[in-house]
Amino acid sequence: MSTTTEWPERPEPPTEADGGGARDGHGVAAGVRAAGVAEPGTETSGGWGARLIRGGATTEIPVHLLSRDGPAPVSVRLRPAVVGRRRSSGEQPHVPRRLPPRPPSRPAPVVDPDLVERPGRTLPGAVGVLGGLAGAVGGAASLWWGGALPHITALPVPAGAQPGPVHWAAVAGSGALALFGFGGLARGRTGKAWVLTLFGRYRGTVRRTGLTWVNPLFLRRRTDVRLRHWRSEAMPAVDANGVALRVVILVVWRIKDTARAALAVEDHQEYLRQCVEAAMARVLSQLPADAFHQDAPTLRDAEAVGDALTRQLAADVAPVGIEVFSAQPTRIEYAPEVAAAMQRRRIAALDAQHRDSVLTSVVDSVEDTMTRLTARGLVELDDYERKALVKDLTVAFYTGRGGDAS
């Protein structure tokens, strides 16, 4: 038993006689729509007619293009979009506050790489005391044995005592021991350190507290390693617009490497002051003191300005062994010669901003009122009456808002 499958014959494209040349208002042949096939020239590679999807009055999209095999889609990285809000509501798109990009860092000052803090050699203070006492006792015994001490005191002269070179050498050695023992004693304090040098060469740093013994031949330079703060005077500066300012900065710092702080610069405190002025001039010149007509980062953002100033100052003073924890501007004000003019400009900007906010609110209120009246069919107004009503409502609302604001 054989089964024969009959395939439907392919419909012939309509001719002009059949109405195939007549087109409707959408630009698609009426005969094609009736036959369910595409126009000539739109067949696929297989010979079958491609159905069309009409996406508009004059737009035709072949169905086979929707599932057409092609190269993989390429991902495109898009910037985050900013969603705009209603213009009539007076709200503006939220723009994050960002500081200007950080300028490229400058090369740090080069310091002798061998000049690094290391502990100096010391002994307990008891060793120095015992050595000094031993030297004193030995010197006295040498003088008595040589016969020089009885002439000073009432001690009897030992038999056969004749002062000679040996006795004087013993006296000199004992005296040197006493001087080294007592002369090397030092009292270490908390928060203080000694930088030791010998003939101009760095020999180490002593941070021990209490009674210690240090070689008396070393030259000691006391250094304060406690956490300290420095408050500057009102220093002159300029902002990004060139407006003269007066700035007071508070710096919290300490000495981290005593060798470099004492030997790499002549005066580390003066070096810190100069670096504060340089960093302040560099950081404050990147931002304006006030943004009168726009929402932009300014020098009033003390946290952001302080962070940038701290990073800059810490990088400048690190090569000389100083560690900066914080550098914050405590007061930023206009210079006396421009203070009055900038104050008037700021008041004018605040007044203009207030007027714009009130006017925007009034327009929104008038718009909502007119929309409710017309949507609910409470009134029917022509153009003249509508304009008159809008004018009256604007005057009434603006007067009320102005009275509330004042």
Image: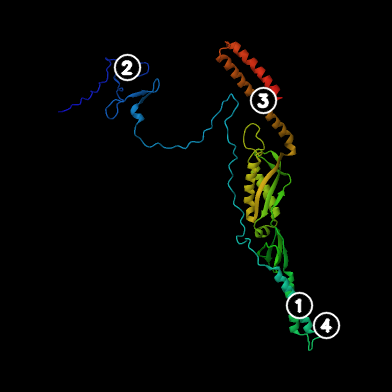
Whole-angstrom CA distance, mark 4 to mark 2, is: 148 Å
The residue that label 3 is drawn on is 355
Whole-angstrom CA distance, mark 3 to mark 2, is: 63 Å
The residue that label 4 is drawn on is 155
Whole-angstrom CA distance, mark 1 to mark 2, is: 133 Å
First in residue order: circle 4 vs circle 3? 4
Q: Residue at x 64, y 23 (%)?
A: 359
Q: List x then y, in percent, for residue 381.
A: 58, 11
Location of residue 172 by image quarter = bottom right
Which numbered marker is on residue 343? none
Q: In the structure shown, which secondary structural element does the residue marked by tag 4 occupy?
A: loop
Discs 1, 3 touching: Cβ within 8 Å: no
Of residues 167 and 29, the one drawn nearer to the viewer in this rendering: 167
- Say if residue 290 shows up in the picture: yes
First in residue order: circle 4 vs circle 2? 2
Q: List x then y, in percent, for residue 246.
A: 72, 42
First in residue order: circle 4 vs circle 1? 1
Q: Residue at x 63, y 50 (%)?
A: 314
